Image (cartoon, helix red, strand yellow):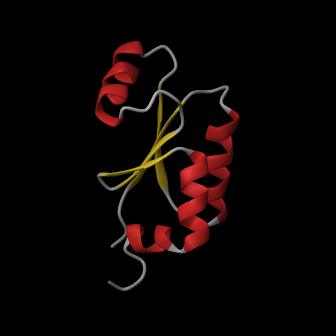
C-alpha cells in the first residue's frame, strides 16, 4: 500500500504547479490542501515544518520539503521507497 501524499499549496505558486505536474506524471494520487485565505492553518504548518514557503509536501508523515526536494528524491529513486512501491 502506498503512503498518502499531501501537498499544501497556494493558487498562484508556480512551484506548486510544478510539484502537481511531477506527481501526476508519475501517476501518484495526492491530496491537495489550499492555504489561500487560511492564515491560521498556514501558521500551524510553518510551526510544524519550520518551512515558510509552499508547496509543502508530505509522504505519509514524512515532510519532504518543497518542489525542489520532491524532484531530487524522485530523480534519486527515493520517492518510490517513501511511497512503499519498492516492495519493501
Percent position of residue 44, x then y: 31, 24
Q: How many marks?
A: 0
Query: Is 14 positioned to the left or the right of 19 in the image?
Result: right
Percent position of residue 17, x then y: 67, 41
In this rendering, does residue 27 appear at all?
no
Question: Residue lying furthest front in this view?
Answer: 50
Question: Is residue 8 placed above or below 46 in the rendered structure?
Answer: below
Q: Quadrant of the C terminus?
A: bottom left
Q: Residue at x 42, y 16 (%)?
A: 38
Of residue 68 and residue 83, the one placed in the foreground of this image is 68
Percent position of residue 59, x then y: 39, 56
Query: Is 6 positioned to the left or the right of 11 in the image?
Result: left
Of residue 32 and residue 43, the one placed in the foreground of this image is 43
Q: Residue at x 52, y 19 (%)?
A: 36
In this rendering, does residue 74 appear at all?
yes
Question: Is residue 80 placed above or below 21 in the rendered structure?
Answer: below
Asked which quadrant contains residue 84, the reply is bottom left
Q: Residue at x 54, y 52 (%)?
A: 69
Q: Quadrant of the N terminus?
A: bottom left
Q: Residue at x 37, y 57 (%)?
A: 4
Query: Is 41 positioned to the left or the right of 36 in the image?
Result: left
Amino acid at each position: 500500500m502506498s503512503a498518502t501524499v499531501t501537498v499544501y499549496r497556494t493558487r498562484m505558486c508556480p512551484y506548486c504547479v510544478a510539484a502537481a505536474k511531477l506527481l501526476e506524471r508519475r501517476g501518484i494520487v495526492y491530496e491537495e490542501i489550499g492555504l489561500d485565505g487560511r492564515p491560521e492553518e498556514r501558521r500551524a504548518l510553518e510551526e510544524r515544518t519550520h518551512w515558510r514557503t509552499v508547496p509543502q509536501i508530505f509522504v505519509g508523515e514524512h515532510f519532504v520539503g518543497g518542489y525542489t526536494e520532491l524532484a531530487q528524491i524522485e530523480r534519486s529513486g527515493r520517492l518510490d521507497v517513501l511511497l512503499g512501491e519498492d516492495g519493501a
